[in-house]
Amino acid sequence: MHRFLCNACAEAFQAVRSPLCPQCGQPFASAHGPDHLCGHCQAHPFRFSAARAAGLYEGGLRVAIQQLKYQRHDALAQPLGRFLWQTLGRYWDPTLIDRVIPVPLHPRRLRQRGFNQAAVLVREWPRLAKGQGYPVPPDWIDRRTLLRRRPTQPQTGLKREERVRNLRRAFQINPRSDNMGIRNLRVLLVDDVMTTGTTADACAQTLMASGAAEVRVLTLARAVVAQR
């Protein structure tokens, strides 16, 4: 992390480590034992196949994300994006991902914030991929296909059931997309933070219903919620 953050923030960084749930990616409280499905994923599997994160939403990483997202410290976008790129390679082969889709903001929120934090994190990825010899197509980063169709209340502070209701029918496939759609494609959904997984699940449900072969999720941070 010293390559991407100041010394104080890097020293406070906490990586996500096993044992964790292989589907939602949440680490367990105990530092011992194998990875295994958490209670929620056993009872109510998500539509995405797997979710992973670089680190816990604590300490320096939390400060960096909040500075980027709310204080508009744009200089953080490049180092955090490169760090997320390295995290992708830690878990998955980029050549096995057909499309990278940042979680979209509603146009109203986009105008207020001025940028989509998920989109700026992957902005440099095509250049990084080509620099490492990965043959990615021109439309590998896809900001057109998935839309947020209605404004939603911020998820912070909401219980899981409230988050699900808040996101019901919030996403849709862009009817004016000029590509061939996402049918049979392996999609990587990217966001800054994952808490309960409801946002990623709502996006994955929309993408899978439109024919995606698989949806995986990658975030910079994973907020630890009560074990289920």
Image (cartoon, helix red, strand yellow):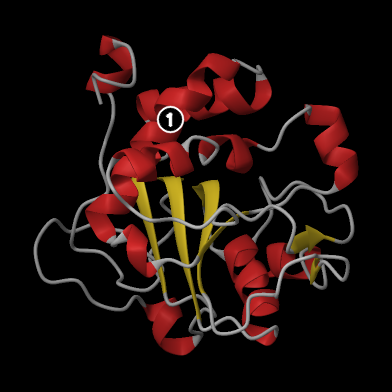
12, above or below 121, in the image: above
- Label 1: which residue? 80
- Residue pictured at 65% horizontal, 60% vertical: 159
Q: Quadrant of the N terminus?
A: top left
- Residue pictured at 26% horizontal, 20% vertical: 3
| Quadrant position of residue 86 | top left
8, above or below 140, in the image: above
Q: Quadrant of the C terminus?
A: bottom left
- Residue pictured at 90% horizontal, 41% vertical: 108
Task: Say if residue 52 shows up in the picture.
Answer: yes
Task: Give whichever of 77, 37 is nearer the camera.
Answer: 77
Q: Residue 137, position in %: x, y? A: 51, 58
The kind of residue tagged 1 is Leu
Q: Residue 15, position in %: x, y? A: 25, 41
- Please give left or right for residue 161 compared with residue 13 in the image: right
- Residue pictured at 70% horizontal, 75% vertical: 180
| Quadrant position of residue 52 | bottom left
- Please give left or right for residue 130 compared with residue 36 in the image: right
208, above or below 166, in the image: below
Q: Residue furthest top?
A: 7
Task: Give whichever of 205, 147 is nearer the camera.
Answer: 147
Task: Give whichever of 224, 143 is nearer the camera.
Answer: 143
Circle 1 Cα neighbour tier, 10 Å, few/some/many (<14 / 14–19 / ≥20):
many
43, above or below 85, in the image: below
- Please give left or right for residue 80 compared with residue 105 in the image: left
Q: Residue 39, position in %: x, y? A: 38, 79
Q: Residue furthest left?
A: 32
- Please give left or right for residue 39 compared with residue 69 in the image: left
SS under mark 1: helix
